[in-house]
Amino acid sequence: VDKTGTLTINQMSIQRLVAGIDAAEIDVAAAVDLPEDTHELVEFGILASQRDPFDPMELAFHHLGKRYLADTEHLHGDWELVREYPLSPELLALSHVWKSPQGRDYVIAAKGAPEAIADLCHLPNEQIRSLLGRVDSLAANGLRVLGVARGEFRQSNLPGNQHDFVFDFLGLV
């Protein structure tokens, strides 16, 4: 069974956005405009993707951004990618560290398995249970679900591990 379409047509699209832990789901296909509270979720999903992606999921993030966030402050073509923290068997999440031309601080974007993103964000057990319940509900509808988080870093030396950043949970895609 190819529920995502990646085997048959090598293409994915983002269908739902859940900004925050207890937020309502946004059906992207039905939305004329995305609600403001989802813009940062899409922004950091893009920042956690390759700038010129080939991966179907990362392409879906970029297409969504071009469709809904063009000409906004949420797309950052002039930012510099400083470091990548890749997926690992121990943590199914990746992080990209960015620096804006105007800023001195780093911005970190993370995406990955929702439980890994919850771990990076140090969410309390009650919030994790709520989050995983939402993930199960989305997955039961045949959707692949990713978590997205953002962080900031002000020191000069980046840590060796992405778990050493302080992340805020942004939502589910």
Image (cartoon, rainbow, N blue to C red):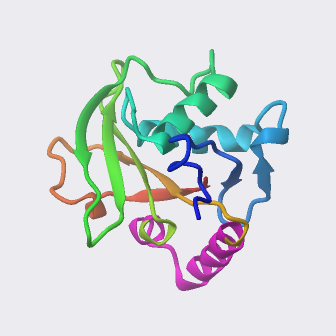
Q: Is residue 29 above or below residue 65?
A: below
Q: What secondary structure characterizes most of the magenta part?
A: helix
Say left or right for 115 vs 91: right
Q: Is residue 96 above or below residue 79?
A: below
Task: Look at 78% across and 49% down and name the residue there.
Answer: 26
The stretch drawn in magenta includes residue 136: yes
From the top left corner, tell me how far across and down residue 162 is, in percent: 27, 58
Quarter where residue 74 is shown: top right
From the top left corner, tell me how far across and down residue 77 is, in percent: 42, 19
Quarter where residue 143 is shown: bottom right
Q: In this orientation, which residue lies closer to the viewer: 95 or 125?
A: 95
Number of numbered discs overlaid on the protein picture: 0
Quarter where residue 160 is shown: bottom left
Numbered range of the magenta stretch:
117-139
Task: Look at 80% across and 31% down and name the residue there.
Answer: 33
From the top left corner, tell me how far across and down residue 39 is, in percent: 65, 37
Say left or right for 117 vs 158: right
